[in-house]
Image (cartoon, rainbow, N blue to C red):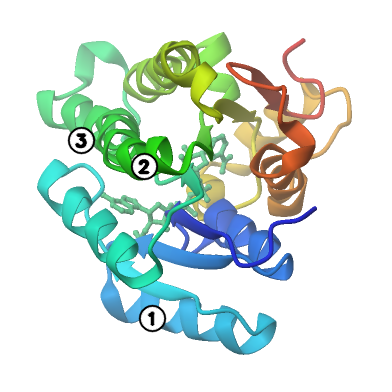
Amino acid sequence: MNLKDQVAIVTGGSRGIGLGIAEALSREGVHVVVVATQQAKCDEVAASLATQYGTQSIGLACDVSSSVSVQAMVKAVVEKFGHVDILINNAGITRDNLVLRMSDDEWQQVVNVNLNSVFNCTKAVLRPMLKQKKGRIVNISSVVGVMGNPGQANYAASKAGIIGFSKSIAKEIGAKGITCNVVAPGFIDTDMIATLPAEYIDNIIALVPQRRLGSVEDVSGVVLFLSSDMSAYVTGQVIGVDGGMHM
Ligand SMILES: NC(=O)c1ccc[n+]([C@@H]2O[C@H](COP(=O)([O-])OP(=O)(O)OC[C@H]3O[C@@H](n4cnc5c(N)ncnc54)[C@H](OP(=O)(O)O)[C@@H]3O)[C@@H](O)[C@H]2O)c1
């Protein structure tokens, strides 16, 4: 796969899908920068990756919804490693509510963390990637961004926004050796869906041709492909990882 000694920033790399992606990249010899909100947790995950896979993984706490915080994080990465090859925009939150009951805060928090973060992180890595004339950007959207979902208008809007942004970026920097693709997971077994009622999950599973939730590994395999040389001629694409829920 030829990813050895590349440097990847994985936002939301402390747990769930992001941790799975960080592990999959580390297994290929990538030095992963684990980004989440708590420094201690980032350090713990990075140290475990470094020990397990013999990489120089580091943890950097950063609120990805803040452009100032993101610029400082990317600056620290470039200062330490001299390059940044892969960006995985994975950090995300939900604040579910019906639109009639949704507060301004619930709307803004979700758009800030899920969508503004993608602009912040992508903009910050573009300069180093343009200099290197190579880069891989993978943005984690959701099946909900493609299909919509009652109670998740804020989340769906943020995830649909990621798709339009990614296609535009793919067109802006396609000739510069940088690809930008989207992975749209279905319902994946992580903390994010842990609080949903069992009956809700059963109803979702009934809509999935494969009749199961997705696993973190289902998603990380596709992200690994899009991070590698194997996907050199793939850009601006939205790859569903949803057991066939949307087709
Ligand atoms: N699980 C699903 O069913 C599913 C389906 C489709 C798409 N997705 C998407 O996949 C991505 C990962 O989901 P998940 O299920 O793995 O979620 P998760 O288990 O809840 O983990 C979310 C991650 O995002 C980080 N994060 C949240 N706010 C942040 C901020 N302001 N700055 C930096 N990091 C922040 C969290 O860090 P802390 O630990 O510091 O909070 C955590 O590492 C999200 O974008 C989600 O929307 C998930």
Q: Are marks 3 and 2 in contact (CB under 8 Å)?
A: yes
Q: Is residue 60 above or below residue 106?
A: below
User: Which residue occupies 44% across, 15% down?
Assistant: 160
Q: Residue furthest bottom?
A: 51
Residue at 67% over, 42% down: 223
Closest to the observer: 181 or 192? 181
Residue with the mark numbered 2: 93
Residue labelled with disc 3: 109
* Disc marking residue 43: 1
- Badge 3: few (under 14), some or many (20 or more) residues near its Cα, within 10 Å? some
Alpha-carbon distance for marks 2 and 1?
21 Å
- The answer to whether the residue labelled 2 contacts the one labelled 1, judged by CB atoms less than 8 Å apart, is no
Q: Is residue 56 left or right of residue 107?
A: right
Counting residues from the start of the chain, the first of labels 3 and 2 encountered is 2
Which residue type does callout 1 highlight?
Asp
Earlier in the chain: of badge 3 and badge 1, it is 1
